[in-house]
Image (tube, rainbow, N blue to C red):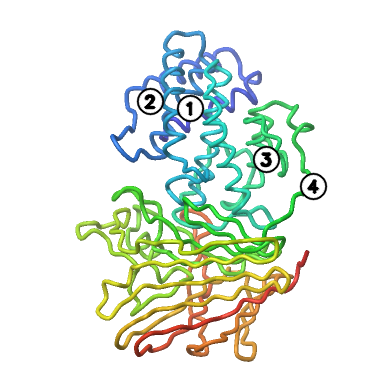
């Protein structure tokens, strides 16, 4: 994977600045790129089932190298092989709703960048991938638009290693504003042209993209909620209001999962300003204890019972890429119109506890009132400690407000109030937020707790203010 990404970066440098290199330097780079291609072709990160972004990167690297080194016969073989494999892998690694099987938002962005680059390389090399692949990639770009808030940023759900294919501009890890124009240009899909034109789009598609694909006014009715059903990601809100709930598959393979133990967790952004956030992913192998800590259910905005995770690790696993899918999440109901959205989700992760039970979370959004109502049901038996956590963005100021809390980030404000069986008054505890791989910031988590004796049902409301339509 790393060799393929390096080869892609070098080809981008040649495309953008090749004439500034002298002839000996260019010859040396071409020779090195051939070496890269031979290495990738003979060291493919293939697996018989559940192939990942590593193998996908290898294929894209071969497609790019094949396209730029034509008509060399070896380059032709690389391109033919890569086109055939990409046709299959795009169908397998992206679900029908367009979202990548890893179910990590930043890995999805990385995979869309890779897929668009591979698609473009195959077209340039005379290997069209066909209408089915194009439609799947249009859906993949549309998924990023659905998950983006008013500022064009996605929540950092799941793992995040901050990978980019060609980082030509400085952006934070959640910024996907450049992806719409990139997808529109590569796929010739005007329906995607609702984002800012980016240098990546100009590099892949030429300067014509600057005038052809530009921001268009929204004319169709806007729903109060949209869903990526295969990925299990649900967006409740419209305009400045953006709440995302995770209720979907934990893993499609037992090893190598990039998902977290975050079923029924929510994130909230108002007016493009994050308020309640997923903590992200600080690191992988350098510090396994931190890797495990950031995927734990206690690091997400959901309910925990007796401070236990929703799922356990495999007993011999030192790092939590290997998970036992005990949560078995399921969307029980989903619907949205122009004014309302409603989600009912369930996971079974706490059935394994003595006296444990399913967690059912119902989320309702009222667009006119700009309000979300969340109800949690846990038909427990016996005594249990139940905890709600809301991880705050480091810029959020949280203050008590009557029987609730007021959360503010700039001109975005949300009031959280309990309306049924309120737990404790709430405390602000130290917490962590990882905006990028290897980076962690101090923040706070708003924590509520109660001792449940038998079945429990509790409800709270999130009322948005500021930055209205």
In this rendering, position of residue 109 left or right of residue 286: right
Circle 1 is placed at which residue position? Answer: 7
Disc 4 secondary structure class:
loop
Q: Quadrant of residue 296?
A: bottom left
Q: Earlier in the sequence, mark 2 or mark 4?
A: 2
In space, the residues marked 1 and 4 are separated at their CA atoms by 38 Å
User: Of marks 1 and 3, which one's residue comes earlier in the chain?
Assistant: 1
The x and y percentages for residue 345 are 46, 66
The span from disc 2 to disc 4 (Cα, nearest Å) is 44 Å
- At 57% across and 26% down in the image, what residue appears? 120
Disc 3 is placed on an element classified as: helix
Q: Are marks 2 and 3 in contact (CB under 8 Å)?
A: no
How far is the residue under mark 1 from the one under mark 3? Answer: 28 Å
- CB atoms at circles 2 and 1 under 8 Å apart? yes
354 relative to 230, above or below = below
Residues tagged 1 and 4 counted as in contact (Cβ below 8 A): no
Q: Residue at x 41, y 71 (%)?
A: 298
Judged by depth in the image, the label closer to the viewer, 2 or 4, is 4
Q: Earlier in the sequence, mark 2 or mark 3?
A: 2
Q: Which mark is residue 192?
A: 3
Residues at marks 2 and 1, CA–CA distance in whole angstroms: 10 Å
For mark 2, give the secondary structure: helix
């Amino acid at each position: 994977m790393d060799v393929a990404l390096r080869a892609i970066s070098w080809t981008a440098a040649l495309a953008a600045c090749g004439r500034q290199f002298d002839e000996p330097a260019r010859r040396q780079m071409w020779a090195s790129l051939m070496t890269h291609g031979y290495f990738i072709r003979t060291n493919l990160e293939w697996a018989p089932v559940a192939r990942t972004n590593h193998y996908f990167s290898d294929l894209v690297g071969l497609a790019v190298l094949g396209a730029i080194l034509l008509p060399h016969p070896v380059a032709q073989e690389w391109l033919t092989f890569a086109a055939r494999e990409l046709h299959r892998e795009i169908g397998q690694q992206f679900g029908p709703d367009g979202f990548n099987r890893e179910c990590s938002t930043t890995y999805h962005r990385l995979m869309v960048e890779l897929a668009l680059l591979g698609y473009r390389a195959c077209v340039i090399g005379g290997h069209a991938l066909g209408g089915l692949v194009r439609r799947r990639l249009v859906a993949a770009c549309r998924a990023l638009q659905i998950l983006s808030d008013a500022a064009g940023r996605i929540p950092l759900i799941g793992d995040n290693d901050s990978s980019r294919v060609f980082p030509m501009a400085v952006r934070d890890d959640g910024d996907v504003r450049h992806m719409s124009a990139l997808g529109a240009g590569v796929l010739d899909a005007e329906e995607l042209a609702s984002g800012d034109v980016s240098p990546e789009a100009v590099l892949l598609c030429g300067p014509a993209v600057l005038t052809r694909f530009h921001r268009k006014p929204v004319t169709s009715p806007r729903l109060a909620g949209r869903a990526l059903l295969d990925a299990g990601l649900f967006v409740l809100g419209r305009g400045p209001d953006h709440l995302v709930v995770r209720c979907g598959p934990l893993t499609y393979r037992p090893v190598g999962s990039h998902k977290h133990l975050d079923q029924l967790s929510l994130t909230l952004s108002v007016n493009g300003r994050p308020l309640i956030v997923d903590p992200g992913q600080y690191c992988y192998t350098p510090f396994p204890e931190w890797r495990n800590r950031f995927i734990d259910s206690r690091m997400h905005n959901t309910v925990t019972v007796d401070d236990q995770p929703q799922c356990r690790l495999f007993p011999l696993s030192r790092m939590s890429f290997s998970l036992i899918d005990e949560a078995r999440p399921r969307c029980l109901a989903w619907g949205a119109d122009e004014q309302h959205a409603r989600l009912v989700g369930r996971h079974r992760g706490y059935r394994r506890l003595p006296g444990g039970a399913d967690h059912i979370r119902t989320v309702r959004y009222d667009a006119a009132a700009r309000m979300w109502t969340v109800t949690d049901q846990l038909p427990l038996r016996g005594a249990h400690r139940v905890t709600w956590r809301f991880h705050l963005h480091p810029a959020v100021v949280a203050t008590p407000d009557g029987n609730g809390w007021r959360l503010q980030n700039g001109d975005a404000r949300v009031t959280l109030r309990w309306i049924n069986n309120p737990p404790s008054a709430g405390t602000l505890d130290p917490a962590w937020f990882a905006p990028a791989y290897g980076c962690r910031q101090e923040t706070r988590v708003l924590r509520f707790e109660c001792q449940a004796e038998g079945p429990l049902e509790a409800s709270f409301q999130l009322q948005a203010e500021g930055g209205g339509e």
